[in-house]
Amino acid sequence: MKVVWSHPDALVAQAARDHLIAHGILAAVVTRTEGLHAGITGYEVLLCFGRQADAAQGLLADGSWRPQSLGEGGWDHADAAPDLSRLDAVFAPECPGCLAPLPLDATLEACPACGGPVDVAELIAQIHGPEALEACYDEPEPTVAEPVVGGFHLLCPGCQYPLDGLARAGVCPECGRSFDKDQIVRDFLGR
């Protein structure tokens, strides 16, 4: 496996992974830590097949796949609003104006106590880091079109025989074990 992208934000690393998968490159995100007792320091995008590194780096180079940041209106759309009710109450921030506790509600635009403007999700990201909001989203399964999965260089889980050119599911011609290419991809992604 080869690392092709590193980033301190899990959401950005996941977007890079999803972009690669959508273009037929099997990738996964892993957490990178420094030292035995250190906290999380970043996320790495790994490729299953190192020979696809140049293509992967080319796809990631322009950055058009990156999600919008909080400051660029990432929460403006109802579909993008995080479900803050999934967070523990300790994540509830205080109003910057009056220091009153704010409810965990991403749609709240004004403090209930003082009426000042607030963005609860942005405050949580500033205080706890953007990774605190990761649990507030349903992580969509990467949609991989049939021709894309067919383009992956997958190996039989039993004998490592290349499954290139074979149906999406079937029996390995080498060892006779049944395979499902979709399941192989899900197993690699840890889903």
Image (cartoon, rainbow, N blue to C red):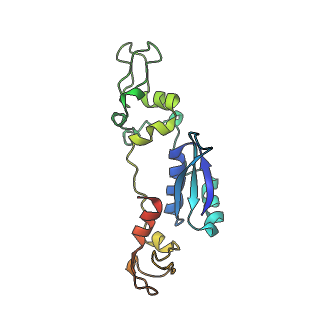
Q: Quadrant of residue 177?
A: bottom left
* Vertical side of 44 occupied by 112: above or below: above
Residue 107, visible in the rendered structure: no
Give x and y (percent) for residue 37. Answer: 58, 40
- Quarter of the image where the N terminus is located: bottom right
11 and 110: which is toward the camera:
11
The residue lying furthest to the front in this view is 36
- Quarter of the image where the C terminus is located: bottom left
The residue lying furthest to the bottom in this view is 173
Q: Is residue 66 left or right of residue 156?
A: right
Give x and y (percent) for residue 157. Answer: 45, 74
The residue lying furthest to the right in this view is 54
Q: Is residue 180 left or right of residue 15?
A: left
Give x and y (percent) for residue 69. Answer: 53, 38
For the image, the number of numbered tags is: 0
* Vertical side of 17 occupied by 88: above or below: above
Residue found at x 43% / y 24%: 93
Residue found at x 33% / y 34%: 85
* Vertical side of 150 occupied by 22: above or below: above
Residue found at x 50% / y 62%: 21
Give x and y (percent) for residue 178. Answer: 38, 79
Q: Quadrant of residue 48?
A: bottom right
* Vertical side of 56 occupied by 107: above or below: above
Residue 8, visible in the rendered structure: yes
